[in-house]
Amino acid sequence: LFLNGSKTFATGSGYVSRPLVTAAMPDGSWQMCIVPLDEISSLSDSSWWHPMGMKASRSFKISFLNAPIHKLNILGKGGDYYSQPAFGGGAIRFAAVQLGGAEKLLDETKIYLKSLNRTDDPYQNKRIGEMAIAVESGNLWIAAAAQMLDSNMMDSKKFTAESLVNYANMMRTAVEQICTLVISHCMACVGARGLNKPHHFDRMIRDLQTYLRQPAPDAVLSDVGSHFLKSEKTSGNFQT
């Protein structure tokens, strides 16, 4: 096989020597392969990546021209990349990273307010309380989704792929909303002073806002509503 074309959002460009690349096959399926960059010719374009945040991620554009891919570097078979519930369930991993950013913002906001002796301000206390509740809610969402996916790995008949993907969609939507609330409250807590150097709230907020932009959030939320309307489940029974 020969790899032709370009891959954008190639995170780790310049550091990762064996990236996992998905490529379209002539039959329309998507094939995963491990590309040994030190053995083939490729072109890395850093000019493509000028994000608002996550600048250190180096998600450049990499182009390939007739790059030979040995059969030993073929991962799985065509179509495996989009197989469910593994594909949709992958949202648990990036949601955990997103929530980690929100946790860091909460911790840093607390440190900042304590340094200014503003811990007795009732409005600051209200915002911090809402941030703490939101972050804990996110941890509960992620733990529940991860437990469902782990249980399914032990017994693939315990949950349907559709129910697992639906729960992952609910979780990723909830975490996005939680992170957005934490960002808003953090900015209100620290004010213009905290968003100025030498403080690093500005960078953390931009990084998290960029990472929150995962594919098709509106479609995912719409799928959640459609799943609930068409299923026989009642509220409180989504983990069945």
Image (cartoon, helix red, strand yellow):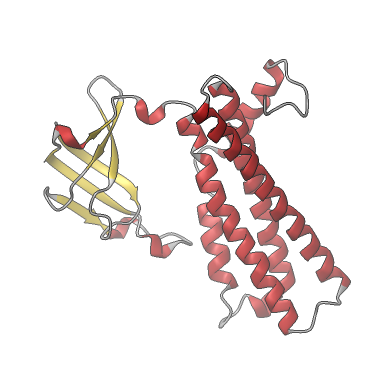
Q: Nearer the viewer, residue 126 or 73?
A: 73
The part of the image, by quadrant, that contains residue 222 is top right
Compared with residue 4, is residue 176 higher up or lower down, i.e. above or below? Answer: below
Compared with residue 22, is residue 29 higher up or lower down, i.e. above or below? Answer: above
Q: Is residue 162 left or right of residue 240?
A: left
Compared with residue 36, is residue 155 higher up or lower down, i.e. above or below? Answer: above
Seen at 68% across and 76% down, the residue is 111
Which quadrant of the figure contains the N terminus? top left
Q: Is residue 63 left or right of residue 187?
A: left
Q: Nearer the viewer, residue 66 or 170?
A: 170
Seen at 21% across and 47% down, the residue is 63
- Give percent across and percent down for residue 51: 43, 59
* Number of numbered discs: 0
The part of the image, by quadrant, that contains residue 152 is top right
- Give percent across and percent down for residue 121: 86, 75
The part of the image, by quadrant, that contains residue 229 is top right
Q: Is residue 39 left or right of residue 213?
A: left
Seen at 62% across and 59% down, the residue is 102
- Give percent across and percent down for residue 194: 65, 77
Which quadrant of the figure contains the C terminus? top right
Seen at 71% across and 53% down, the residue is 136
- Give percent across and percent down for residue 100: 58, 58
What is the residue that sits farthest to the front in this orientation?
154
Q: Nearer the viewer, residue 138 or 152?
A: 152
Q: Is residue 16 left or right of residue 57?
A: left
